[in-house]
Amino acid sequence: MRKLFNIALGLLCLCAASCAPKDPIEKKVDDLLSKMTLREKIGQMNQLSGGYSSIEAAAKGECGSILNCVDPVEINAVQKAAVEQSRLGIPVIASRDVIHGFHTVFPIPLGQAATFDPELVEKGARIAAIEATSYGIKWTFSPMLDIARDSRWGRVAEGSGEDVYLDATMGAAMVRGYQGADTQDPTSMAACIKHFVGYGAAEGGRDYNGVSIPERSLRNTYLPAFKAGVDAGALTLMTSFNENDGIPSTGNKWLLTDVLRNEWGFDGMVVTDWNSAGEMIAHGFAKDLKHSAELSLNAGVDMDMMSFGFIAHLEELVKEGKVSEKDIDRAVRNILRLKFRMGLFENPYVDEQKAGAMDYAPEHLAAAKQAALESAILLKNDENILPLTNKKTILLCGPLADNPYDQMGTWTFDGQKEHTVTPLAALQKDFNVIYEPVLASTRDLSTANLGKVRAAASRADAVVVVVGEEAIMSGEAHSMSDLRLKGAQSQLIEAARQTGKPVVAVIMAGRELTIGGDLKNCDAMLYCFHPGTMGGEALADLLTGRETPSGKLPMTMLVEAGQAPFYYNHNRGGRPCNGTETLLADIPLQAGQTSLGNTTYYLDSGYGPLFPFGYGLSYTEFEIKNVKLDKNSYGKDETVKISYDIANVGKVKGTEVAQLYVHDVVGSVARPVKELKRFARVTLEPGETKTLTFELPVAELAFYGLDMTCKVESGDFKLWVSNDSASGEPVDFEVR
Ligand code: GLC
């Protein structure tokens, strides 16, 4: 009887499920798909670059999307061809690399990560979407979620650095910002989490180079941010150029189907990177373009960006039985679902009259300035030389002191330098400025004008040197093997030091450079990455003391490039360095053949980094103390409640980033010495103390262990609440 009842119940559920009203979008997708020819289906899977040049294909229903067109008239022309001339009138979706702002340019994403302010990052993405969608852009290829632990890789500029939690938090914030609360809203822009996966681990920091990341490291380090992006509702994902262990991501079925679809339930659309399908030939993974189309479709790719393999070969591959129309239907469903979700069928056209209506709106500029303020990291401030109060005249020098173009940073196709506020333009409102660029560019090796520094400094109360990288020196394909300042920029800082006046060095770069050699030649250093449109005004507020720096390093800052990859959340290893080992300078001549320190360090560049992940000073000082747990033993379904006191023990108001790190002392596999699990920006008046808490569910201590299942392992743990990854005292607790 019981068995019969269960069968009946099962049948009832089955019927209910099949009778349940389908998600209206799924029904529309089914209806439309059922009308499409094979050629029309394949046409949707083809993304083309450019506007007018794509009209013919769009009219034939052979272009599902365009990129690199931002003219609303041109976009509408392509859309008109697709909607009014193609047989089924399926709209195209226009896309663009809107990476850190559209017209109003925000700090590069690595700079935004340094704010440790996800709400602000979300706001910046929302502003970018408002500006870009007014031109007809409905899809951005952002956020980049690649964990990056090697500043030689130029694309560190586009991500959130080395830490899993920071990367996931900032990536999810951008997804929410771009897409907004309602993807049918005209200002919603589909996000694209990229580059899936492991691209930032390129061997040697050389872009496009292969990576070797075993599955456990993928799952514990490189995949979590993408899972966070999927959970945040990202509507699209982009495959990465690189291969991992010999398998290019664009042809990796385990990655694109088993993990992304079957494990995570991702129902968005997967696009390749630019010709990354075709590049599988160069990888030696595909025989030819036809073979690359077969491999990428069968792996789980939906749309092909600019290899033309799908449009050229999928029909014959179906005839040959090498790909199935069922798989093509899968891809087209994902594409149509995206377009329905974005409201393109109801509203395919952009209102050309309203294009740019919100560009550089005061609230946009204010947000960009706030991001530039919060992204600035104070690395040094001897004798509290900053802020430059009671300094009337400053000598402002350096190739980036008045460089509106490079200040915007990498991937700013649509940034308009005419709107950039440079340090020179801003500082002239607060100081009597003597301006001497001295170098023609960041790569200018000439020292002929260094003498001008001494002459000009005699008339100044302080010297501000703005140096760093041109925008082109970071970003895609721009790897560097030497991370020191280029040209004669270090000599310029030295010349400033020789004037005997207080020297403030300001670095604008797309990565963390090795500036250790420059530190001794300045009294203070502000690291601003490329701060975007409002960088000059933010700098003026910081130098005058109207604002106080609060940025924190999103990557470990190296002494030498040769230390890379170097990151705080490393495994301990069997011979951790204790910081007392013999250094090169201490080794006697004809030294005996001992192995010296017997631990992991560098004879020449020493025991650790220049500055740790999470480091950044303020004009005031903070103390974090009385870190207490609500108990010291937890079940796996409980939550660790951590209270701590944070005090502003200095003389001015400031904001600290309290950081919670955890270490799993013994695991079924070795675990990182520390992992960031929470952070909070805390603003305090001088003398003010707050008692705050973090709550950390024990479940968030789960990881993929020896048996490759994701679970929390019982045992001893340590935790820190501190103001960077290298400070603070541990508190012990156990998980039962
Ligand atoms: C580039 C980049 C990718 C970008 C795409 C479209 O090669 O790797 O990040 O979104 O092409 O421009």
Image (cartoon, rainbow, N blue to C red):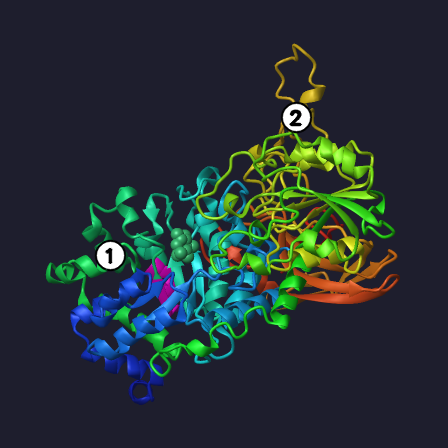
Q: Is residue 246 left or right of residue 180?
A: left
- Residue 308's label in the rendered image is 1
The answer to whether any part of residue 302 appears in the image is no
Ligand 1 image-quadrant field: bottom left
Q: Which label number is shown at residue 573?
A: none
263 in the magenta segment: yes
Give SS at disc 2.
loop
Residue 262 image offset from top left, x and y in percent: 36, 65
Q: Quadrant of residue 582?
A: top right
Q: Residues within 10 Å of mark 1 (few under 14, many from 20)?
A: some
Residue at screen point 47% across, 43% down: 478
Residue 65: x and y, percent?
A: 32, 67
When the figure is inspected, residue 119 is found, relative to residue 468, above or below; the finding is below
Mark 1 C-beta closer than 8 Å to ligand 1: no
**Amino acid marked by disc 1:** Phe
Is 346 included in the stretch rendered in magenta?
Answer: no
Above or below residue 392? Residue 48 is: below
**Residue drawn at 33 percent across, 61 percent down:** 50
Compared across the picture, whether 478 is left or right of 549 comes to left
Q: Which residue is mark 2?
A: 597
Which quadrant, please, contains the C terminus?
bottom right
